[in-house]
Image (cartoon, rainbow, N blue to C red):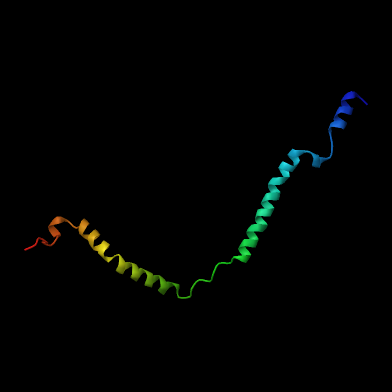
Amino acid sequence: MSQLGKQVESASGPWWKYGHVWMVLAGPAIVVVAGVVTAMIAMDGADPVVDPNYYQEGLNINQKLEKSLAPAGAVRNHVVTPDEDLPDLTPK
């Protein structure tokens, strides 16, 4: 056997002793572990069921907001109203 053949034979070893092999295998392994963890979280933390009366609840929230924002809405409407359409608010 030639000198070159002996060098190649002695330089090679088992695949698990090379760091780049583990780096290549680490990517898919991390993805599999992340997928399993995600599946466990999804199964354990299921979303709550939507309230059957969700539409009425939304309307009630909107009514509360309309009442609390009424002064701001009135001011906003006066800001965009042209001056000639405004009532005379000067003190008499």
Image position, residue 65 (x, y; %): 34, 67
Image position, residue 82 (x, y; %): 17, 56
Please indicate whether residue 41 sits to the left or right of residue 81 in the image.
right
Q: In the figure, 33 relative to 66: above or below?
A: above
Q: Which residue is drawn at 13% across and 62% down?
A: 87
Image position, residue 24 (x, y; %): 72, 42
Q: Residue at x 41, y 73 (%)?
A: 57
Classify residue 44 by image quadrant.
bottom right
Q: Nearer the viewer, residue 19 or 85?
A: 19
Please indicate whether residue 2 sits to the left or right of residue 42 in the image.
right
Residue at the limit of the structure toward the top, as seen here = 3
Q: In the figure, 19 relative to 50: above or below?
A: above
Q: Which of 2 and 65 is in front in this view?
A: 65
Image position, residue 92 (x, y; %): 6, 63
Q: In the figure, 33 relative to 87: above or below?
A: above
Q: Which residue is drawn at 69% across and 53% down?
A: 32
Classify residue 84 by image quadrant.
bottom left
Q: Residue at x 80, y 42 (%)?
A: 16
- Point out the image quarter for the N terminus: top right
Q: How many labels does the image show?
A: 0
Residue at the limit of the structure toward the front, as seen here = 91
